[in-house]
Image: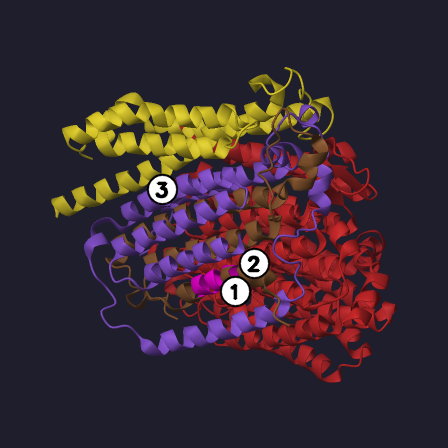
Amino acid sequence: MTVYIMILAGFVIFASAVAVEAKKLLSTVISLGAAGMALSVIFLMLGAPDLAITQVVVEVLCLIWLIRATGEERDATFETQRDRFILAIGLGGGGVFITLCYFAFQSLVGFGEPLMNLSNQYLQNDPEKIGAANYVMAVLLNFRGYDTLGETTVLLCSIVGACAVIRKIGRIKDAGHDINS
Amino acid sequence: MFNHSFLPYIMAFVIFAMGLYTVVCKKNIIKIIVGLIIIDYGVNLFLILIGYRTGGIAPIRAAEMNAEKFINSSVDPVPQALIETSIVIGLGVVALTAALAVRLHEKYGTFDTTKIRKLKG
Amino acid sequence: MEKLLPLLVAIPLFAAFLLPLIDKIRNGSGISRFLAPFVSLVLLILVFRSLASSEVTYWVGGWTPESGALGISLVLDKMSSFMLLVINVTAFAVILYSHNYMRRYTSESIYYCLFFLMVTGMNGLVLAGDIFNLYVFLEIAAMASYALVAFGCDTEELEASFKYLVLGTVGSSFIIMGIAILYNQTGHLNMAQISLNLPAQNMAILMAGAFFMLGFGLKAAMVPFHAWLPDAHPSAPAPISAMLSGVLIKALGVYTLLRVFFTVLGMSFEFAHIFMVLGALSMVIGVCLAVVQWDFKRLLAYHSISQMGYVVLAMGVAGEMMISQKLSIASLALLGALFHLMNHAAFKSLLFLCSGAAEYATGTRLLKQLGGLKHRMPVTSGCLRIAAFSISGIPPFNGFWSKLIIVIAVFQAGHYGLGALTVLVSFMTLLSFIKVQRYVLDGDPSPCVEKAREVPFAMGLAMVLLALICVFAGLLLPYFKPFLLDQAGSVLVQNVPQVIHLAAGG
Amino acid sequence: MQGMTLIVKQVTKLVSGFIFLFAIYHILLGHISPGGGFVGGVAIGCGLILLILSYGKEYFNTLIKDRTIVIGFCLGAIAFLLLALVGYCGGTFFEDIWAGYGGKYTILSGGTIPLMNIAIGITVGACLVCVFVALIVFHQDLKSAKGEE
C-alpha cells in the first residue's frame, strides 16, 4: 500500500510543481486540478470515501472560481524570465525544512499504526445510539457537531466577506465633511 | 537505521513546503492563491496519513457487520472529520482571495505583485 | 451559569446570521444600527454573570466523559472569563462608536454581521477546551477580520487585506499541522487530555511547538512575523482598527500562546527563552519604527507591536521562573502580563477611536495636517490625552502600573539588561506620544481642523467609557486583583508539576 | 451574461437533473453511506453554476433571484443553529434528542443528523452560488463601464 501511496503522492508533487512553474494561468489552474484529483484517489485508497467525493466536488468548484477570477487574463503568458536565484533559495530553504522535519518524523507514530485513543471510544457506540452508521458523519454532526457549526460559519463568513469586498461602492463620499477637500 | 514507516509523511511535508515556497516567492496573485491551495493539500494529506491503519476499512458500519470486528479494522474517523473541516475552510479562503484578487485586478489591471505598491516583498 | 455558557457563542452567531437578511429589507441599516448595541449589551450582561461563577465545564452534545473526553468541552475558568470581559467590553464600546461612524460606509448590516462573527469567533476561542475547536473559532475570527480590513474597498485596504489574508492563512496552516502532530502523538484532541497523555519531550513535540510558535506568533504579530500588522490595522475602518489592535491580536495570539504553551505543551527553557527574545525584539523594533511615522494610525499600529512585546516578554519571564520553581515571581510576571493585556485593550482601542474621531471630523490622519484639535474637539482631545499618558506610563493611569509590575518582575528574575530595556522602551513611547500631542492637540488650528466640530454623542460616549477605564483601572487594581487577575494567573501556574516533568524529559 | 450554444444547453438540461439527484441523495443518506451535507451542498452549488454558465444569468434570474440566494443561506444557517438549540432546550447544546427514532438504517434513524445535513446543504449551496453570481455581476459591470468609456 505504501508504494501506491508514494506513487500517487509523487504525482501530486509533480502536478503541483507544474502548477507552480507553468507559464500560462490556464495551465496552472488545470494542473492544480490534476493534483486535486490524485489527492482524491489517495483519500479513496486510505479508506475515506466521504473525503474523496468532497475533494472532487470542491476541486471542480475551485477551478471554476479561479478561471472566472482570472477573467480575460487567463490566456496571457507571464513570467517570461524565471528568477533562478529565488528558485535556488526556495529549493535550499525547502531542503533545510524537510531535513529538520526528517529528524522529527522519527519520533512520530508510524504510518499505518494510529493510536486511536479517542476514536475507539467513538467506534464503540452503536449506530442506533448515535443515529449514523457512517462514523465520519457521526463525528461531524453528533460528537463534534459544534465544530461543524463553526465550519459552516467560516464558509458563510468568507462568502459574506467576499460579497462585501466585491461591492461597487465602499464609502459614501459626500456624507459629513468631504474627505477630499 | 532506516525506518521507512514515515516515508509518506515526508511526501506530505514536501507538498506543504512547495506551497510555502509558492506563497513566499511567486510574484503573481493567482500563483499565490494556488500556493495556498497546495498548502491545504499538504495538510490534508498529512492528516489522512495519520489516520490510516494498515488494511483498514472505511469507517462505515454495514448492518450485518460484527461490532468487535469493525472496531478492530476501521480506520480512524476523527482525522477524516478534521479534513472535512479543513477542506471547507480552504474553500472559504479561496473564495475570499478570489474576490480580493478580482478587485485588485480591477484597480491595477494586473495580477503582478511587483506592480502593486504594498505587496512587494 | 453552566447552562448559559453556549449562549455566549449562540447569541452573536444568531445575530450574525440574521443581519444579512435585514440588509435585504428596506431601511435595513437603520434596524441593524439599533439591534447591534442591544445584542452586545446582552452579551456583556452574560459576561458579568460569568465573572461571579466558579470554574465550570460544559460538555456539548451531552457527551459527558466516562473514560476520557468524548465530545467537545466549553471551559470557563478564570482566564477565560477575564478574556471574555476584555473582549466584550471593548466590543460594546466599539459598537456604540460604530453607530455614527459607520454611516460613511455602505452595507452597514453586513458590517455588523462580520463584526458579530468576529466576536463569536473570539468568544468561542476563549471558551474552547478542545484544541481543534480552538482552531475553528480562531479561523472564524480571522476570516471576519480579513473581510473587515477590506471593508472600505479602497486600493490600499484591498492590498493590506490581501497581505493579511495570505500571511494569516499560512499561520493557520502551521497551527493545524501542529494539531495534527499532537493528535498523532497522543490520539486525543481535548487540551487537558493531550496535556496528560503527552509523551516525554521528543523531537515531534518540539516540532509541534515550533509550528505553534510560528502560527500563533504570526497572529500575535511578534517581530519577525509582524509584516502584515502595520498595513492591516491602519487600513481598516477606525472601530475595526480598535478591535483588531485592542482585542484580536490578544485573543488570537497571546491568549492562544498562553493556553498552548502553559497548559497543553508545558513550558520549557527553550520556549521561555524564545519568548523573551521575541518579546524584547518586538518591543524595541516596534517602538523604533513607530517614532518615525507621520501617519497617525500607522504610528499606533507600530506601538501595538511594541506593547505586545511587553506582554510576551512577561510571559517568557513567567515561564522561566515557573520551571526554576520561583512561583511568586512567576505569578507576579503573569499578573503584569495579564494586567498589561487588559490595559492595552483599553488604551489602544481608545487611541484608535480617537484617531478615527479626528479623521471623522477633519478628513485627514496625517499628523502634520492636524493641529490645535483641543480648541475644536474638547472631548476627543481629553480622551486622546488620557490614552497617550496611559500608554506612555505616566503615574496615575493604568499603563504605568502594569509596566511597573512587569519591570519589577523582570528585575526580580535577574534579567537586569532586559529590565533596563523595558524602561528605555517606555521612555521612547513617551517621546513618540509627546510628538503626537504636540502635532495633534496643541498649537493653532490648522486649515483642516478649522471647520471641525465635536463628534456625535454615541461616539463620544464610547470614548469616555474607555477613558474612564484607563483612569480607574490602575487605581482600583487592589480591589479587582484578587478575584480576577490573580486567579487567572493561577490557572496557568497550576500546571507546574507537568512543566517540571517535561523539562526533565527534554 | 450570454448563454452558451444550443448543444451545451441541451446537455445541461439532460445532466443537471442527475446532478441535483446526486446532491439530494448525498444529503439525505449522508448518515448511512458516504456523503453528507457538505458534499451535497457543493454539488447543488455546482449544478446551479452550470445552469448559470450555460443559460446565462438573465435566464437564471427568472428561476432564482439574487435576493433568494442570500435569504437561502441565512435561513439555512439559522436552521442549523436552531437544530442545535433544540438540543439545548431538551438537554445540552447539540444533543441529538431524536436519535434512534425511526428504526435501523433508514433516513429517519438519524435523529437530527439528516435535518442538520439538509440545513448545511442549503447553506453551502446558496453560499457558493452567491459568490459566483457576485463575481459575474462584477465582471459585467466592469465590461459595461469599459464600454461607456
10 Å crowding of disc 1: few (<14), some (14-19), many (20+): many
- Which residue matches tag 3? A60
Q: Whole-Å distance between the Cαs marked 3 and 2?
A: 38 Å
Q: Which chain is brown?
A: B
- Residue C423 location in percent, x, y? 69, 78
**Which region is colored magenta?**
B12-20
- Which residue matches tag 2? C245
| Disc 3 and disc 2 in contact, CB within 8 angstroms | no
Q: Quadrant of residue C475?
A: bottom right
Disc 2 sits on a residue from what chain?
Answer: C
Q: Magenta stretch: dominant SS?
A: helix
- Shade of chain A as shown in the rendered figure: purple
- Shade of chain C as shown in the rendered figure: red
Q: Is residue D142 visible?
A: yes
The amino acid type, in three-letter code, at marker 2 is Ser
The amino acid type, in three-letter code, at marker 1 is Ala
To the question of a shared chain for discs 2 and 1, the answer is yes
